[in-house]
Amino acid sequence: MTENIEAIDDENVENITKTANSVQFLSFTLGNEEYGVDILKVQEIRSWEPVSRIPNVPAYEKGVVNLRGSIVPIIDLRERFGLGHVEYSPLTVVVILQANFEDRSCVMGVVVDAVSNVINVDKSTIQNSPDFGARVSTEFINGLTSVDNKMIMLLDVDKLLTLEEIYENEDNPLQAIS
Amino acid sequence: MSIDMAQFHQVFFEESFEGLDTMESGLLDLNTGDVDVDEINMIFRAAHSIKGGSGTFGFTAVSDFTHVMETLLDEMRDGRRLVTQSAVDALLGSVDCLRAMLTAIQDEQAVDTQNVAEHKKVLEVELTRGADSSPVASQESATSEQVSDPVAITAHEANVEGWNISFSPHPNMLKTGNDPVRMFRELAELGELTSTADFLGVPDIHNLEPEECAISWKLHLKGNTAEQDIEEIFSWVEDECDFAIQKIQSTVQSVSPVAETTDSTTTVQPDEQTSKEDKETTAEATKPVASKKPVKDKKETAKPANKSSGSIRVDTTKIDTLINMVGELVITQSMLSLVGEHFEINKLDQLKTGLSQLERHTRELQESVMNIRMLPISFVFSRFPRLVHDLSSKLGKKIELKLVGENTEVDKTVVELLSDPLVHLVRNSLDHGIEMPEDRIAAGKPETGTVILEAYHRGGNIVIEVVDDGKGLNKDKLRAKAIEKGLIDEDAILTDKQTYELIFMPGFSTAEKLTDVSGRGVGMDVVRRNIQSLGGNIEIISELGKGSTISIHLPLTLAILDGQSISVGDERYIVPLGSIIESININEDMVNRIAGKGETFRLRDEFLPIVRMHDIFHVESAKATKLTDGLVVVVEGQGVKCGLFVDDLLGQQQVVIKSLEANYRRVEGISGATILGDGSVALILDIPGLVRLANQ
């Protein structure tokens, strides 16, 4: 991980200033897959710390932590995407993201295997994600790009959160009655 | 030296809006036909300070408009005019209009001049009507006067030859910075002025107070001047002097032309009033009274928006206590640091005293800070008289609103968020609850329906009730509707309470036809959601034909709570201390099983269900799975008692409530979260939610 951070310092800082039409993404890995999120949505990167579990929620919603006084939910992206579970280690990374939903913004943390790099992506090179039909959900994938022949899936942070909201609507008051 | 006036604008707006609220509630309290001078004075004062303030800040549109209102109020105050329903309505309409104007100015938007002009006209029509509203006058004459020939009136006006003004300032007038000389100079500009001073009141030289004004004047102003212009000169001192204006009629003055045109049964006194009123008639007299119609409609749209103001007014004594408290805290802190500087074991006692002092002061400080955030619930309630007034006339129902416990204090956040749901509930009561007068009489009830808004404290909660004596909820109808909408199964067995709860379901409305007041089928579910998001609960009790009671239970404050921490496995939860009745160890023979599954235990005379926390929260690490291994905490929430089965009780502590929803969402059974001393997060349990969860 430390190597990666050095890489950010040396090469990419120059690139940042050079390209105008580019967007920056923070890339991270989940298993063998590489993902990216818009760097402007990233608030901070922390190491994993134990969470307080929330009862009766999907398993990938790990719980909540205290982030300088505010309660922030932590979501395991591996489990969210059905990539299986790995034991957390002190090297497990939590990326704190800021998402906007309707008119409010909220902060959440996602557990990823490792943060790899800050990448500059030319907007024109971003492809739409291919349609896999119902088999694979590409709902929160904004587009695909490649860096060094490696495909990176760019995630839509806002949608990641919006998906959770569906659960809220599901809690049907009827259950309280019948 | 130039002062940036803009810095005072915010204060002016706040005060003005407050003044408007005062006026509104005052107007609603006015009994038609019965003049309560204090009430009118209060309204008048509010209008007067808005006028003064807006004049100072150069909002001439506002001050001009207020002036017209003031004139009307002034006449009511002096008993020269009866308080009629139409006048009150006109004034209420103009309060709305003023509010809209002020809001527009505050937002730096253009004032809706058309709206203003309309309201002004209504007021002026009302003013002209006043000429004959001396007790003998009839409504008929009012209309007949309005169509009287303007030309004739102008002619009549021209007959004024001059004015006799008697002016005797109160002794302290000079101290407020008002100089009679300046006023006389202004008067002289209106016409030829002669003055006679009256020195009778001047004491002898030994008793003379040079700062007091003991002289009074008799002034004679020649020329055809409007009374209004004269009054305006005195308007700044009208509370600090006795003054009277008398018109000198020309000798050629015939019978008032108004009297000629009006019905002979009407008596119009050609007193000093007439010319003034008539003058204002000229412009507006031909305006039909029908122009009131759009005003009524406007009222609906001009409802005061639910502003959550960023500032609150705080009693200075509250702040003084706070400052004292901070002082104490500083002293304790310095004492502690002294102890800590060269700490030896024999200072341990000192340290302990210091720490306990610190604890006490922190608690007191916290209490007084919370106290500052507390506002009386009347902030919410105060808008309802108006709402009921408007709605009842719109619905054609007779409704009396009673407010009880307006001084109950609630946290500011609660106050602000409570407003919308309450409006909804009251509207519902008015629209669906209270029957039409004839139906009420037929049902043997008093013609006037009663809606009671009540607030009181109970335990750590504030309870707000909306009670109506209307037709109540029809259980069969509710049930049929729910089945029709597919919300419940046809053979579902529901208790009364569950049946009433149906109305909180999304998309449920039993109103036969939709009105624009309520009954759109959205609403009650939103109300419940809003209340729940405040950490509260809402329930309905109803009796067919007798009325319904909707009660809202809300936590007193949203910020801090006395909590009992409990442990279940590795998890720690906080139970609000207010909802705990007791904690007991139970043995196996106290437990009964219902249908082999549901566990109950007997506590004195009651059978209470046992809610196994580790079960409903799926905590795998729970230590106690046998009932005898753990503890049962008996809790109560919204009338439901149950025993929470937990591993252990930890300590009691005050916790700061943090919202789970800010970044996450609502979780059933959890009302919020808090951060413990070690920095970790503990969830705060929501007892009614838990019971619901356990019943699923």
Image (spheres, coloured by chain):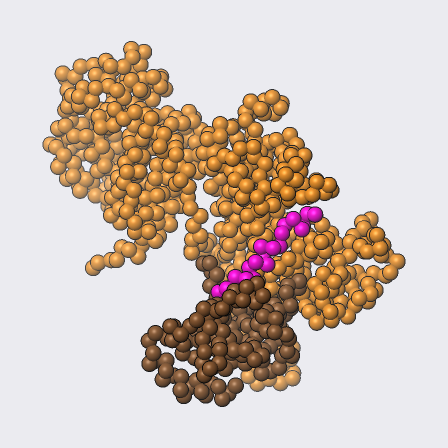
Chain colours: A brown, B orange
Q: Quadrant of residue B195?
A: top left
Give the position of the N terminus of chain B as an image quadrant. bottom left
Is A19 left, or right, of B695 in this rendering? left
Is B577 left, or right, of B643 in this rendering? left
Q: Quadrant of residue A39?
A: bottom left
Q: In the rendering, at what x and y percent does residue B38 appear?
A: 41, 34
Q: In the rendering, at what x and y percent does residue A157 appear?
A: 49, 68
Q: Viewer-proximal residue, B534 or B198?
A: B534
Is residue B517 positioned above or below B415 on the image?
A: above
Q: Viewer-proximal residue, B94 or B25?
A: B94
Q: Residue at x 49, y 27 (%)?
A: B396
Is B693 left, or right, of B103 in this rendering? right
Is residue B310 positioned above or below A85 on the image?
A: above
Instruction: Check residue A162 for magenta coloring.
Output: yes
Q: In the rendering, at what x and y percent does residue B375 appear?
A: 50, 51
* Res A10 visible: yes
Q: Residue at x 77, y 70 (%)?
A: B623
Give the extent of the magenta segment.
A158-178
Q: Residue at x 69, y 53 (%)?
A: B692
Q: Residue furthest left?
A: B192
* Res B237 visible: no
Q: Residue at x 43, y 27 (%)?
A: B32
Q: Viewer-proximal residue, B167 or A170?
A: A170
Q: Viewer-proximal residue, B265 or A5?
A: A5
Is residue B684 positioned above or below B537 on the image?
A: below
Q: In the rendering, at what x and y percent does residue B174 appear?
A: 25, 44
The secondary structure that most of the magenta stretch takes on is: helix
Instruction: Check residue B377 for magenta coloring.
Output: no
Is residue B215 positioned above or below B245 on the image?
A: below
Is B552 left, or right, of B287 in this rendering? right
Give the position of the C terminus of chain B as an image quadrant. bottom right
